[in-house]
Image (cartoon, helix red, strand yellow):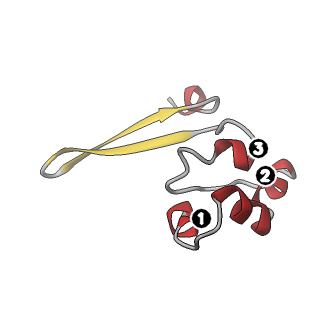
Amino acid sequence: MDLYRLRDGGRPLAAEVARLGLRERRAEGAILLVEWGTDAEAALGGSATLVVELSVAGTSARRAVLTGHAASALA
């Protein structure tokens, strides 16, 4: 989900997350892929299991930094 777009609706982000039932789905074991979710962890039910941060490392290179509980299993 793209949480950036939810912020454009005029309602608080936590209210939109609740309206969509995202916290409940996560508690049931669903995998949530969230774009622009840095400040949404509390609304989504706690810290992210895996955070992927992408950045430009040159004209034709990108860098991915993995953090969170699941990051060490992927390294």
Tag 3 near tag 2, CB within 8 Å: yes
Identify the element where label 1 is drawn: loop
| In the image: residue 14, left or right of residue 6 | right
Sequence order check, earlier mark of 2 and 1: 1
What residue sits 76% from the left and 44% below the top?
Answer: 45
The relative height of residue 21 versus residue 61 in the rendered view (above or below) is below
Q: Position of residue 60 (x, y in %)?
A: 16, 52
Q: Which image quadrant is residue 6 in?
A: bottom right
The relative height of residue 35 versus residue 39 in the rendered view (above or below) is below
Which residue in the protein does label 3 denote?
A: 45
Residue 1 - label? 1
Q: Residue furthest top?
A: 72
Q: Position of residue 7 (x, y in %)?
A: 55, 65
The three-letter code of the residue at mark 2 reads Arg
Identify the element where label 3 is drawn: loop
Q: Nearer the viewer, residue 16 or 46?
A: 16
| In the image: residue 4, left or right of residue 15 | left
- Numbered disc in front, either 3 or 2: 3
Circle 2 residues within 10 Å: few <14, some 14–19, many ≥20: some
The three-letter code of the residue at mark 1 reads Met
Residue 66 - label? none
Q: Nearer the viewer, residue 14 or 50?
A: 14
Q: Position of residue 5 (x, y in %)?
A: 52, 69
Sequence order check, earlier mark of 1 and 3: 1
How far is mark 1 from mark 3, CA to CA? Answer: 15 Å
Residue 26 - label? 2
The three-letter code of the residue at mark 3 reads Gly
